[in-house]
Amino acid sequence: MTKIDGHIHSPYCPHGTKDPFEKYIEQAIQLGYTQITFTEHAPLPKGFVDTTPTMDSGMTRESLDLYLSDLKELQNRYSHKINILIGLEVDFIEGYEKETTDFLNTYGMVLDDSILSVHFLHNKNSWDCLDYSHEYFNRMLETYGSVDLIYDKYYDTVKKSILAELGNYKPKRIGHMTLVRKFQKLHKPTHSYEQETNDILKLIKEHDLQLDYNGAGLLKPYCQETYPSEDIIKKAKALNIPIIYGSDAHQAKDLNQGREKMLL
Ligand SMILES: [Zn+2]
Ligand SMILES: [Zn+2]
């Protein structure tokens, strides 16, 4: 039986923990995983300035080679116990498609499995990190004027990420497709956005992509559901979209998070 976690961070995450790779790997083996993908936040595109207060959304470009060579070594060392895939969580940032394509054309050939995620929303001449904190989300509300307008922009950006060219090494999996709901207990939109999420599933299907079924949201106090939620997962299954569990662990003890409550 295969047991997969396709979304794991690492000691190279600037906002994560320093838990060494081995700690994640040993824990995953303990939990019975047969395949895991490390998907560290890729370096942000050239020229893009991280707008988060801590400026730590992606790993540095300087550390990328070391991340990849560490993983190559671990992949070999643990090959008899667990299948380790080398990946990245690549940001889709509207306006930086060219830089992202250049990046993927440079590194894509050494990646086994990657995720494309939207964390930043383009607004005039600035980009806001949607999931940074609820205080930050509050500031976005002042700029956007309503929760609905943030949701509109988010789902629109996810659609763009699916439609974007990004070259031959474009990631095959869409990360946490309802991340905008991270603070839903504090800020509710006026409608369900069912049409938008249906449209996104349809696009994922048409473009032969996979869906990250992310357990992290269940543990977030203002979210309390997976990304995406069960109703959306049921529709994705009906469409035969490949669904890959992701713990989105930023520390070894978060592996497997949410999993027992999920439709896997
Ligand atoms: Zn992260
Ligand atoms: Zn993410």
Image (cartoon, rainbow, N blue to C red):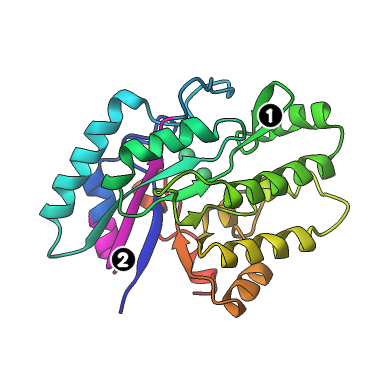
Does residue 13 appear to the left or right of 84 in the view shown?
A: right
Quarter of the figure that contains the N terminus: bottom left
Mark 2: which amino acid? Leu
Residue receiving disc 1: 136
| Residue under the point 30% across and 66% down | 33
Secondary structure beneath label 2: loop
| Residue under the point 68% across and 31% down | 122
Q: Is residue 38 magenta?
A: yes
Q: Nearer the viewer, residue 21 or 149?
A: 149
Does residue 26 appear to the left or right of 47 in the view shown?
A: left
Does residue 82 appear to the left or right of 189 in the view shown?
A: left
Beta carbon at label 1 within 8 Å of ligand 1:
no
| Residue under the point 46% across and 64% down | 245
Percent x, y for residue 137? 71, 33
31, above or below 255, in the image:
below
Mark 1: which amino acid? Tyr
Secondary structure beneath label 1: helix
The label nearer to you, 2 versus 1, is 1
Percent x, y for residue 264? 49, 74
Q: Nearer the viewer, residue 85 or 216?
A: 85
134, above or below 240, in the image:
above
Which comes before the other along the chain, label 2 or label 1?
A: 2
Q: Quadrant of residue 6?
A: bottom left
Percent x, y for residue 242? 48, 70
| Residue under the point 37% across and 25% down | 60
Q: Residues within 10 Å of mark 2 (few under 14, many from 20)?
A: few
Magenta stretch bounds: 26-43
Residue receiving disc 2: 31
Tell me how many marks there are.
Answer: 2
Q: Residues within 10 Å of mark 1 (few under 14, many from 20)?
A: some
Inspect this view and state whether residue 222 appears.
Answer: no
